[in-house]
Image (tube, rainbow, N blue to C red):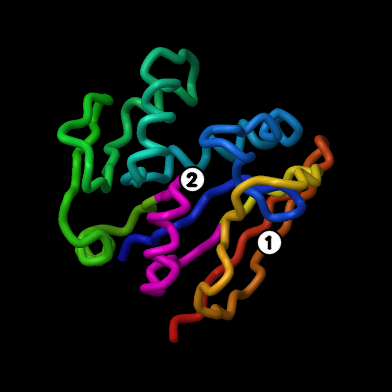
Amino acid sequence: MRKLIMWNIITLDGCFEGGKNWDLSFHEAIWGEELKKLSIEQLKSADFLVFGRVTYEGMAAHWKTAEGEIAGLMNKIPKLVFSRTLKSVDWNNATLVKGNTSAEILKLKAQGDGDIFVFGSANLSETFVNDHLFDEYRIGIASIILGNGRPLFRKGMPSSKLTLVSTQQLSSGGAILKYTTEKP
């Protein structure tokens, strides 16, 4: 069975973006060779990448013209874009999905044994958290207190018991935490 994995970078105070969409300037504080290596490993294990509309638009705008090994993988991997408002998607190997998000992910999980990664996509991720679909959380912590911005996990989300499976300190001062979930 495929695993659904959340991959996000947050600040120490829990923000995954600043006050505006795509305010990700703090990502530079954590980026380095270790995170580049992890990114390549994750992408090589991915059967699918999953995005909500806002994340899809930002990712597509960047990666369609980017170069390098990560860009090559990002452009090659099949992508699912969950949106009620988009009419079409034009990023290589992207498919627009308008159906029930959780039902679609459950079908995908049952059809293989690779990884499905959700990058960014806080609203979509909240749906998957609420429906207990994530098998693993991989969270990069940037050593910055942003002071304002959008939290990755909003107040009022259901409680979930997680098990820490690994930590990796980065030379940039950040860290990568990996948790598995305990299904209810």
Nearer the observer, disc 1 or disc 2?
2
Q: Residue at x 61, y 54 (%)?
A: 151
Measured as percent of width and height from the top left, residue 22 is found at 53, 33
Please give the range of residues in magenta: 117-137
Q: Residue at x 80, y 42 (%)?
A: 144
Front in this rendered view, residue 78 or 90: 90
- Percent from the top left, x then y, of residue 58? 43, 29
Q: Magenta stretch containing residue 24, yes or no?
A: no
Q: Secondary structure at mark 1?
A: strand
Say whether marks 1 and 2 touch (CB < 8 Å): no
Q: Could you say which disc has been placed on residue 120 in the image?
A: 2
Q: Nearer the viewer, residue 46 or 129?
A: 129
Classify mark 1: residues with Cα within 10 Å, few (<14), some (14-19) or many (20+). few
* Circle 2 crowding by C-alpha within 10 Å: few under 14, some 14–19, many from 20: many
Give whichever of discs 1 and 2 has the lower sequence position: 2
User: Which residue is under mark 1?
Assistant: 166
* x then y, percent, for residue 71: 44, 22
Task: Say if 49 sits above or below 63 in the image.
Answer: below
Q: Is residue 119 magenta?
A: yes
Q: Is the N terminus in the top left, top right, bottom left or bottom right quadrant?
A: bottom left
Q: CA distance from mark 1 to mark 2?
A: 21 Å
State the image coordinates of residue 148 (x, y, percent, origin top left). 71, 46
